[in-house]
Each structure stands twice: as C-alpha cells, then as structure tokens.
Image (spheres, helix red, strand yellow):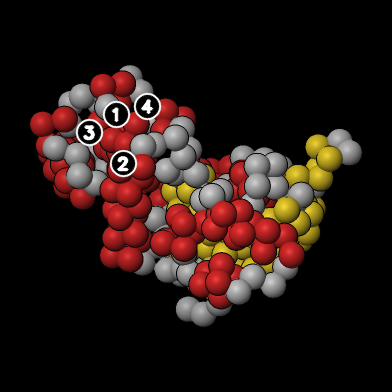
Amino acid sequence: MTGPLLSVRGLTKRYGPRTACEAVGFDLDAGEVLAVVGESGSGKSTLLSCIAGETALDAGTVAFRLRDGATRDLAALAAAERRQLMRTDWGFVRQDAAQGLRMAVSAGGNVGERLMGVGERHYGRIRATALDWLARVEIDADRIDDPPTRFSGGMRQRLQIARNLVTSPRLVLMDEPTSGLDVSVQARLLDMVRRLTAELGLAVILVTHDLAVARLLSHRVLVMRAGRVIEMGLTDQVLDDPQAPYTQLLVASVLAA
C-alpha cells in the first residue's frame, strides 16, 4: 500500500467573521509524527477537532487510508463507519485527561471498555490486556481497580494513553498532552510517548505550544498563525533555521526565556 495515511486539503473553518483555519493542507505518512505549533488562538486545536470530525468543516477534505488500502473522505463515512474507525484505527489523547477517561470507572475498565468496543467479550483476556497496558504506561498492577479520580495528573494522562493505544490504532491525535503537568512529570510522560510511538510505528498529530516537546517527539513541524500555515518542514530544519519571520520570532522567544 502506497500513499499517505492521512491527507488534509483546503481545511477551512470559520466562526462568523473569525477564521479559525484557512485552507490548511498537509499529508501524514504511516509512522510519522507531525507537531502543530503556534501561539494560543492560532487554530491548532480547531485543526485537530476538525480532523477528528468533532467540528464540521466549512470547506476542504480529510481523507484517511483504510487498512484495505482504500482512501476515504471522512465526511463521506456513515456514522457507524466513523464510530468504528475511532474505536480501532484512531486515538485522541486530550489535554484534560478527564475528558478522555471515564472518571467513575476503574483504570482496568477504562482500558477494557475500548477492547469491548471492538468485540472482545472474554473477561480474563480483557483484564490481562489491561494489566499489560498499565505496565506499559508505568502504572502499578495493584491500581487496576482504582478509578482515575484517585490518580495524579500524570497517571491520568498515562492511563488515557493506554486506553487509546490498546486497540493498536494507526493514527493518534494529541492535544497538548503535557500541558499543566510538573516539569519532572512532563519529562517522564514525554519519554514514554516517544518510546511507544517508535515501538508501535504510530502516526501522530501533536498539537503543542512547547517547541521543546515538538523537537523531542516530531519528525516534521507545521507552524500556524491566525488559522494559516506559515511554515512547514523537518523539525530540526524549521527550529534551527526558521525561514518565516513569525517562526523566527517564535523560536527567538523560547531562546530568550
């Protein structure tokens, strides 16, 4: 199978007179991590929400290559097809882990629920897989029956990652996954995300305001300002030798901090 895993073309979203995204386009290959960076209000999270199908587009297409090799416009999928895709091939790690978890359900139940969504019904296998994934995200096995309300922020984020990855998705969307965490917790989480993306060959779209996170995790960077793509290229190339004046200011502001 050839061609990109995801193709975004002319993606546009407006809220009245305000343009959140204007003719955004890019391709994402299997196993590639693309960081989307920019200031608050640049359109990063709107772009992610549009790609995920949570926000309707005003124009443009988002096409995904299915496992059978066929490429489909996500807007053309039936509701049942879209739900199945989100349960299997896609994951979405949200900035606030409470939005991506069932907070009243146990840690094991959070992971197992996604397995049940793809047809697994054997309790023993579900629990064993949940235990395996808790170990992979560095959560002790004796916490499997604890609800996320008893977890720290970093543990909740790691649990959310396990919940998303348990069905072996090919594409994962991440919206500021380290925001609001202590520096030491961020470092541990980033090391884990880098390890898992490499091990599993995940394609990832990572929204972040932190250029250090983009440098650590991504192969390419897409810079947004006021809903438009200002610059895009290999991560080291863009961050070490930015061409657009806005990107130069963005990088300079980090160096001056």
Give the residue number, with chain letter if any, for mark 4: 102
Give the residue number, with chain letter if any, for mark 2: 185
Give the residue number, with chain letter if any, for mark 1: 152
Q: Is residue 159 left or right of residue 53?
A: left
Of callouts 2 and 4, the N-terminal one:
4
Q: Which circle, 3 or 1, is nearer the viewer? A: 1
Three-letter code for the amino acid on which mark 1 is drawn: Ser
Crowding at label 4, few (<14), some or many (≥20) Cα neighbours within 10 Å? some
Residue plotted at (70% across, 42% down): 41
Mark-to-mark CA distance, 4 and 1: 15 Å
Q: Position of residue 168 (x, y in %)?
A: 34, 56
For the image, the number of numbered tags is: 4
Three-letter code for the amino acid on which mark 2 is drawn: Val
Is the C-beta separation of discs 2 and 4 under 8 Å? no
Secondary structure under badge 2? helix
Q: Which circle, 3 or 2, is nearer the viewer? A: 2
Residue plotted at (75% across, 56% down): 228
Q: Position of residue 19 (x, y in %)?
A: 81, 45
Mark-to-mark CA distance, 4 and 3: 11 Å
Of callouts 4 and 1, the N-terminal one:
4
